[in-house]
Amino acid sequence: MSKGKKYTFIALAFLLIAFLVWILIMTFGVYSEGIRVGILDKFSKKGVVFKTWEGELRIGTEDRINPQRFVFSVNDNEKELIQKLQDYNGRQIKLYYKQKYWVFPWQGDSEYFVYKVDLVK
């Protein structure tokens, strides 16, 4: 193998590895984490092909005419969290979430994924 072919192969291998690392970061990486407090207005399993758990939190005001909404998703394997959210519908809660870079259709509709919920007294 000549030097030119060897360096070309190394460069292509490096680019391929860099691309795969970028894909992994965008798929599994967390862009931000945070907490939202509000009243849980809606939580349901929806979708035509991929059934995902989706919810809406009304934030900051008791105004039902023009509220600020926080739309979120919950992973299907979080059974205890799903049950808590179903029980807390219509009540004031605190959601702990992680924002993803990329979301695939089978994961959820939102880029915000809730991993913990607390009831606000």
Image: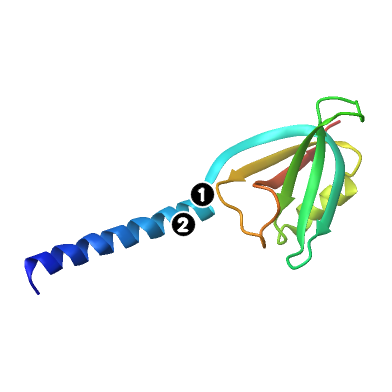
Q: Position of residue 32 (x, y in %)?
A: 57, 38
Q: Residues within 10 Å of mark 2 (few under 14, many from 20)?
A: few
**Residue at the outermost left position:** 2
Marks 1 & 2, CB-CB < 8 Å contact: yes
Residue at the (40%, 56%) spot, across then down: 21
Residue 92 falls in image quadrant: top right
Which tag, 1 or 2, sits closer to the chain's start? Answer: 2
Q: Quadrant of the C terminus?
A: top right
In the rendered image, residue 30, in percent from the top left (x then y), is placed at 54, 45
- Residue 29 has which mark? 1
Place of residue 49 in the rendered image (x, y in percent of width and height, measured from the top left):
75, 68
Q: Secondary structure at mark 1?
A: loop
Judged left or right of residue 62, residue 16 is left
Q: Nearer the viewer, residue 60 or 87?
A: 60
Looking at numbered disc 1 in the image, what kind of residue is underneath it? Gly
Label 1 Cα neighbours within 10 Å, binned few <14 / some 14-19 / many ≥20: some
Identify the image quadrant of residue 18: bottom left
The relative height of residue 33 versus residue 104 in the rendered view (above or below) is above
Give the color scheme: rainbow, by chain, secondary structure or one colour.
rainbow
Amino acid type, mark 2: Leu
- Residue ID at (46%, 52%): 25
Name the foreground residue: 116 vs 57: 57
| x 30%, y 58%: residue | 15
Please name the residue shown 84% across and 30% down the image.
Answer: 67
Q: Which mark is residue 24?
A: 2
